[in-house]
Image: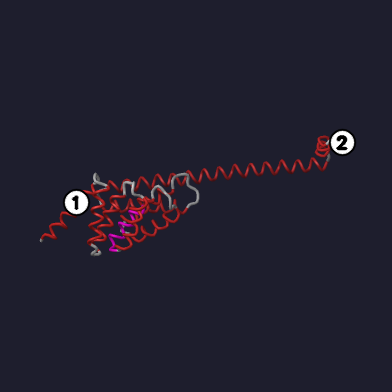
Amino acid sequence: MRKPAESKTSYFLSKKGKKVLKISLILSVVVLGAGFFLYAYLSYAGKLTYEKYLEGKDFYLKAQAEEDKQQEKSDLKKAAELFEEIISRRFFSGNKQEVFVYLADCFYRLGESDKSINLIKDFLKRYPKSYFSPWMRLKIASICEEKGNYEEAIKYYQIIRERYAQTSVAPEAVLGEARCCEALGRKEAALKLYQNLISRYPLSSQAKIAEAKLQNFARTNEG
């Protein structure tokens, strides 16, 4: 009786076995080749996208320092176009979340606040636990407040106050919520928020503003 090893050797030495072995080798080469070309393509695509990211960031930073308003707008538009293209692409070796942050600010500074709001909402759906979430929530809250949508702004400010109390944006969120309450005529709620801001973040610049607000309230009541 033949041993199993001898049976396998005999099989691969046979005409049929050689054919199977040849096909297996060809398939292996094809798979390896396809894998290599896919890797090369993804690397190349990622590199091109990253170059666009650097170009977009360069335009964005130039706009930050630009004194000429027309040139600033031109740089922001170029940056926005590049950032939009990056977001639409599937392959990017960099941090796509950061691109959302830059693009949201580009839209806002170009006067396209609704586009900025929609982009931030999309970002928060895609990356709910992102490092940038507190800053993006603060951005959308401040835009809503600026547009007079105080109730909507309060919702975002409250989320920051409750979820991100230890972050650097928390004092600004408390101050923003207080401003919105004041704008809506909710004086007592605004007073409590200003007091909370002073007691919780006493060393913040926002606490100084809150102190001035409380003093103003006191003078108004005395009058």
Left or right? Give the position of 122 relative to 16.
left
Disc ID at residue 114:
none
Quadrant of the rendering where the N terminus is positioned: top right
Near mark 1 (Cα within 10 A), the count class, few <14, some 14-19 or many ≥20, is some
Visible residue check, residue 105: no
Report x, y in % for residue 53.
Answer: 41, 46
Indicate yes or no whether the magenta region holds residue 144: yes
Report x, y in % for residue 41.
Answer: 54, 45
Quadrant of the rendering where the C terminus is positioned: bottom left
Q: Residue at x 25, y 48 (%)?
A: 199
Left or right? Give the position of 111 relative to 211.
right
Element carrying mark 2: loop
Q: Amino acid at mark 1?
A: Glu
Residue receiving disc 2: 2
Colouring chosen for the image of the structure = secondary structure
Task: State whether the magenta stretch is mostly helix, strand or loop.
Answer: helix
Indicate yes or no whether the magenta region holds residue 6: no
The foreground one among 194 and 4 is 194
What is the span of residues highlighted in magenta in the rendered image?
136-148
Residue receiving disc 1: 211
Report x, y in % for residue 34.
Answer: 62, 45
Name the outermost residue toward the left.
223
Element carrying mark 1: helix
Q: Nearer the viewer, mark 1 or mark 2?
A: 1
Visible residue check, residue 56: yes
Name the outermost residue toward the right.
1
Near mark 2 (Cα within 10 A), the count class, few <14, some 14-19 or many ≥20, is few
Report x, y in % for residue 114.
Answer: 35, 61
Q: Residue at x 87, y 36 (%)?
A: 2
Quick check: 212 above or below 6? below
Q: Earlier in the sequence, mark 1 or mark 2?
A: 2
